Image (cartoon, grey):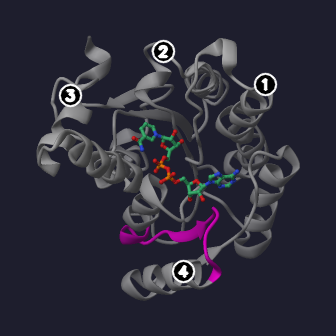
Amino acid sequence: MLEGRVALITGSTDGIGLATARALAARKASIVLNGFGDADLVARLCTEISEQHGVRAIHLPADLSIGEEAAGLVETALLEFGRLDVLVNNAGTQHRSPIESHPPARWDYIVSLNLSAPFHTIRSALPQMKTRGWGRIVNVASAYGLVGGIERSSYIASKHGLVGLTKAVAMETAETPVTCNAVCPGIVATRIFYKMAKDLAAREGIGREEAQRRIAASTMPSGRPVAPEQVAETIAFLCSPAAAEIRGAAIPVDGAWAAH
Ligand code: NAD
């Protein structure tokens, strides 16, 4: 489905981003990984993806909290491959504290990474997508891009902003073959989730499965975490021909969290 296309997934050395890189490589896209991580591990990921799927996979470092590096990442990918067809803005982080004690520097960092980086990458990638006549932009927001919550002001504001950016770009590209959408995951079973469940199980003297259920059920009526692959497959669907007229959507993958 994506043969001959090139996909850049930010923050793809782990978690949802890595699952997305694998899902797009399985559809024959060449892959640009980005994100932090041990150099040997990252090299192994590139080799594994490229051998498993018969595509080119490279890693390009960039600290996306710095605007010039976010724009530079797209420019370097274009130099390497001569094209960029799929852009998945996935890198993101959060800080938990009440707003009164939220360090201003952490606010700036989180807004830079979660919201400004997608602005810079989209701004740099869009012109050649339009010229080439095809493009898919998917922003990984969050259920917290759709609903409020406590002790996460920077995360919630930046993810709501990312959903807004998605709509703005979708409207500006509505007459073109480039689409822009967001996915809004609930609690995803990444490394941090399993660690939280392990800690809760030890603290409460309960089984790990019960701990996972309790964490998931704290916000999701399903009571189950979302698998990274389920988010990745939703992103892959947005890159399919069937999704060509899905524009400006913010698709929850969240066990009915945002349906409250
Ligand atoms: P993760 O922590 O497992 O991985 C984050 C990736 O981003 C890593 O590759 C890391 O190296 C990279 N990264 C971090 N800071 C970076 C920076 N400054 N520059 C470049 N790369 C950077 O993350 P995850 O849990 O898979 O989350 C991915 C996205 O999904 C984030 O935007 C997150 O907000 C969103 N999300 C996650 C969940 C969840 O439960 N995990 C839920 C909803 C939304």
Image vertical order of residue 17 relative to residue 4, above or below: above
Badge 1 local density, few (<14 within 10 Å), some, or many (20+)?
A: few
Q: CA distance from mark 1 to mark 3?
A: 31 Å
Q: At 74% from the left edge and 70% from the top edge, which residue is drawn?
A: 82
Disc 2 marks which amino acid?
Ile
In percent of width and height, residue 195 lies at 35, 53
What residue does disc 4 label? Answer: 41
Image vertical order of residue 109 relative to residue 209, above or below: above
Residue 150's tag is 2
Question: In the displayed structure, does residue 101 sit left or right of residue 86?
Answer: right
26 in the magenta segment: yes
**Residue at the right extreme?**
68
N-terminal-most mark, 3 or 2: 2
Disc 3 marks which amino acid?
Ala
Check if mark 3's residue and mark 2's residue have beta carbons within 8 Å: no
In percent of width and height, residue 29 lies at 48, 69
Q: At 32% from the left edge and 18% from the top edge, which residue is drawn?
A: 258
Q: At 26% from the left edge and 34% from the top edge, which residue is drawn?
A: 215
Q: CA distance from mark 3 to mark 4?
A: 33 Å
The magenta-colored residue range is 25-39
Q: CA distance from mark 2 to mark 4?
A: 36 Å
| Count of picture labels | 4
What residue does disc 3 label? Answer: 217
N-terminal-most mark, 3 or 4: 4
In percent of width and height, residue 31 lies at 55, 70
What residue does disc 1 label? Answer: 104
Badge 3 local density, few (<14 within 10 Å), some, or many (20+)?
A: some
Q: CA distance from mark 2 to mark 1?
A: 17 Å
N-terminal-most mark, 2 or 4: 4
Disc 4 marks which amino acid?
Leu
